[in-house]
Image (tube, helix red, strand yellow):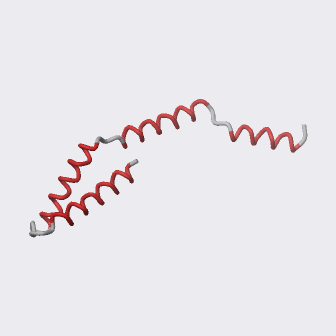
């Protein structure tokens, strides 16, 4: 065989993942999907808690509840996006 045939064979070997690599990739994918699944109720609970702490940080200032809630939503959504 010539050099071209050897390179072609080597390239095919590199492109095709073995069974162990496939299993690892599938396991990582399942773990990421499992970690990313939260219910709307869980998300709401997380936002409620975050909004409370944001309001506490601002001294429970009157008239800030909408702003605090929106900030909590941004924080939680960013956190959930980054965790998946």
The total number of labels drawn is 0
Q: Is residue 48 left or right of residue 60?
A: right
Q: Between residues 45 and 20, which one lies in front from this camera angle?
A: 45
Q: Between residues 5 and 29, which one lies in front from this camera angle?
A: 29
Q: Is residue 58 left or right of residue 47?
A: left
Q: Between residues 26 and 68, which one lies in front from this camera angle?
A: 68
Residue 62 in percent (x, y) is at: 9, 69
Q: Residue at x 18, y 53 (%)?
A: 48
Q: Residue at x 20, y 56 (%)?
A: 50
Residue 27 in percent (x, y) is at: 47, 34
Q: Is residue 77 left or right of residue 6?
A: left
Quarter the N terminus occupies: top right
Q: Residue at x 37, y 43 (%)?
A: 36
- Residue lying furthest top: 19
Task: Reply above or below: 21 against 77.
Answer: above
Q: Is residue 52 left or right of residue 75?
A: left
Residue 21 in percent (x, y) is at: 57, 35
- Residue lying furthest right: 2
Q: Residue at x 87, y 44 (%)?
A: 3
Choose top left, top right, bottom left or bottom right for residue 34.
top left
Task: Reply above or below: 83 against 59.
Answer: above
Residue 37 in percent (x, y) is at: 35, 40
Q: Between residues 32 and 4, which one lies in front from this camera angle?
A: 32
């Amino acid at each position: 065989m010539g050099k071209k045939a050897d390179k072609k064979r080597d390239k095919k070997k590199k492109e095709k993942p073995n069974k162990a690599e496939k299993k690892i990739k599938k396991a990582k994918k399942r773990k990421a999907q499992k970690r990313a699944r939260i219910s709307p109720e869980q998300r709401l609970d997380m936002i409620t808690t975050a909004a409370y702490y944001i309001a506490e940080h601002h001294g429970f200032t009157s008239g800030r509840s909408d702003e605090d809630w929106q900030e909590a939503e941004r924080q939680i959504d960013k956190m959930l996006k980054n965790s998946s």
